[in-house]
Image: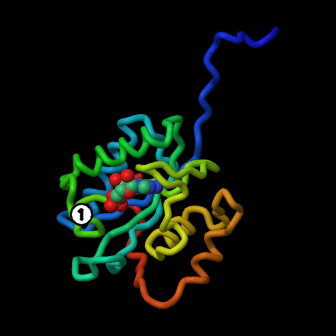
Amino acid sequence: MLPNAAAPAAVSARVGYLGLGSNVGDRGAHLRAAVAALREHGVEVEAISSLYETEPVGEILDQPDFLNAAARIRTELEPEVLLDLCKAIEVEQGRMLGGQRHGPRPLDLDLLLLGDLELETDRLTLPHPQVRSRRFVLEPLLELDPELALPDGSRLAAALEGLGPGQAVERVQPWVCR
Ligand code: AMP
């Protein structure tokens, strides 16, 4: 039978990776709430890394350490819709809109990779611009998928090996609530 030209094309789900971080309040509770909220909105959370205690990196170093993790997801949401969902969940967890960039925050939910998409809009860059340079991103991602590569084929394990000193990251405990 010929395909029906009027039928909408089937939307295929993409596998993606999110970075989660918190350094304000009950950090673990914020990360768990983020995963629960993603699931409530239909995002399939396939796997979550251990929790990592990490020192602040970036423009503001004088702030509490972060608790970080990474999640592998499967979703049919288009990238900017997924970004909007991440931003809404951050606000739900008490993040102030317009707060200081790189400053303390109850929840940071970053879209690191989404399938093989490479894009740059006013609001969204994929892969995330810092995915190769942040140890607190690379270590949890590689725990989930040691062979993970960017759409251009470059392996994240090579990016981690190439990082200079600094950016202390310590794996502290497995994710408890799957
Ligand atoms: P952040 O301070 O990490 O929450 O990010 C600030 C802004 O970065 C967000 O409001 C986004 O519009 C933008 N952004 C660009 N690319 C990404 C991405 N891959 N994931 C999350 N935010 C992004």
Which residue sits at x=43%, y=35%?
42
Q: Is residue 4 visible?
A: yes
SS assignment at label 1: loop
Q: Is residue 154 left or right of residue 119?
A: right
Q: Position of residue 110 (x, y in %)?
A: 41, 56
Instruction: Check the picture and name the quadrant holding the N terminus.
Output: top right
The outermost residue toward the front is: 122
* Within-10-Å neighbours for mark 1: few <14, some 14–19, many 20+: many
Which residue sits at x=32%, y=50%?
34
Which residue sits at x=63%, y=74%?
157
Q: Nearer the viewer, residue 153 or 35?
A: 153
Decide: is 151 above or below 66.
Answer: above
Q: Nearer the viewer, residue 119 or 34?
A: 119
Which residue sits at x=33%, y=43%?
37
Mark 1 Cβ inside 8 Å of ligand 1: yes
Q: Amino acid at mark 1?
A: Arg
Looking at the image, in which quadrant does ligand 1 appear? Answer: bottom left
Q: Quadrant of residue 85?
A: top left
Q: Quadrant of residue 70?
A: bottom left
